Image (cartoon, rainbow, N blue to C red):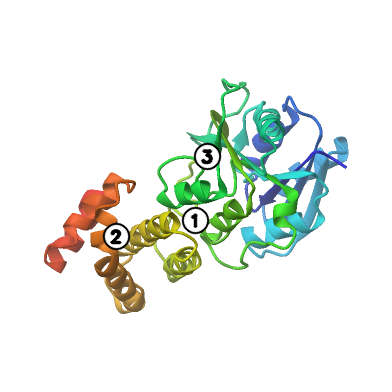
Amino acid sequence: MPAVSVIIPMYNTEAFIKDCLDSLIAQTFSDFEAIIIDDGSTDGGARIAASYASSDSRFKLIGQPNKGPSEARNTGLKIMRGEYVTFIDSDDCVAPNFLETLFFIAQLHQADIACCTSQYIDETYVANKIAPSTAVSTILTPEKATATALYQDSLPDYSAWNKLYRASLWKERLFPAGVIFEDLATIPDVLLAANEVAITNSKLYLYRKRSNSILSSRFTPEKAVLLDIAENVFDKMKNVSKPLYKAARSMLVSASFSILMRSEDSDEFADCRKRAIAHIRKYRLGTFFDLKIRMRNRMAILLSYLPRPLFFKLLKKGLS
């Protein structure tokens, strides 16, 4: 049984999958399996991934009809064999000491989750350097880690990647099928279920910013699910503890501002925008006096007291 399972959902990333898999080949930690889930790609990415699977027994390629990144990850979760598991997007890379560092701090502290810092890279970057690493790591309780993720201002965040998880955390847990923002719907629950979360500030995960990515493209009705997910997370967290209530409240207000800033004022988004406005009005005062919220949210709250047309105009102009 490998120590770590690496799950890589892949869809039409022919231009980047080689860099991703090469960054795994270069790992200073070798006791892993890499499960590549080809989610119905129509480019040559599967052919590239197949060459790795045929030459290195640690790599496995699984094909399936296109179902989205959540279902691709879920396929990997159902067949993984490692004691720990991590997720890497197929257009991203990891530093050569990514697995070694996270496995070390997880073992050192007997933590269910280890998390590192991410570094944004452009579309031409190739990962080939060992990131500066430090033995210093921070330990957070599950409640503190979850609250920190919901405030969205420091580690851990609620991204699925940049973390190493004890596999048992996923035994009866999957990503929601067919939606985007699946990380927000899932990772806060996973953090809260952990015994401890170990954090290192080493920049070990390399997140590739792409102009045509799902989250950077035009706002669509599918993206309006962000508010549904934020409401569900808030409902689950609000009665756990006061710190988690405040953190989840901040997240809900932030998601509401995001909806107003990115969606058009049209019939298509009328219900979503109405709910977002209601959340802001209900929770803005308490959120404003929460010292842990991000400055951009504090500024947005101040703007929300202006007449609505002026508020919408300044929100889009000043926070975009």
Q: Find residue 163 and name its label.
A: none
- Viewer-proximal residue, 247 or 98? 247
Q: Find residue 208 and name its label.
A: 3
Specify the farthest residue to the front.
Answer: 241
Q: Amino acid at mark 1?
A: Ile
- Snapshot quadrant of residue 161: top right
- Snapshot quadrant of residue 260: bottom left
Q: What kind of element bears circle 3? A: strand
Q: What kind of element bears circle 1? A: loop
Q: Position of residue 179 (x, y in %)?
A: 55, 66
- Snapshot quadrant of residue 17: top right
Q: Position of residue 291 (x, y in %)?
A: 29, 46
Mark positioned earlier in the residue sequence (3 or 1):
3
Verify CB contact (< 8 Å) between mark 3 and mark 1. Answer: no
- Mark 1 vs mark 2: give the one in front: 2
Answer left or right for 9 relative to 269: right
- Viewer-proximal residue, 263 or 166? 166
Q: Quadrant of the N terminus?
A: top right
- Mark 2 vs mark 3: give the one in front: 2
Q: Amino acid at mark 3?
A: Arg
- Label 1, label 2: how far apart the Cα atoms are: 17 Å
Mark positioned earlier in the residue sequence (1 or 2):
1
Q: Find residue 214 and name its label.
A: 1
- Label 3, label 1: how far apart the Cα atoms are: 13 Å
Mark positioned earlier in the residue sequence (2 or 3):
3
Q: Find residue 261 and name its label.
A: 2
Residue at the spot 29% in from the left edge and 65% down from the top edge: 283
Check the image and report above or below for 296 versus 283: above
Q: Amino acid at mark 2?
A: Met
Q: Position of residue 235 (x, y in %)?
A: 46, 69
Q: What kind of element bears circle 2? A: helix
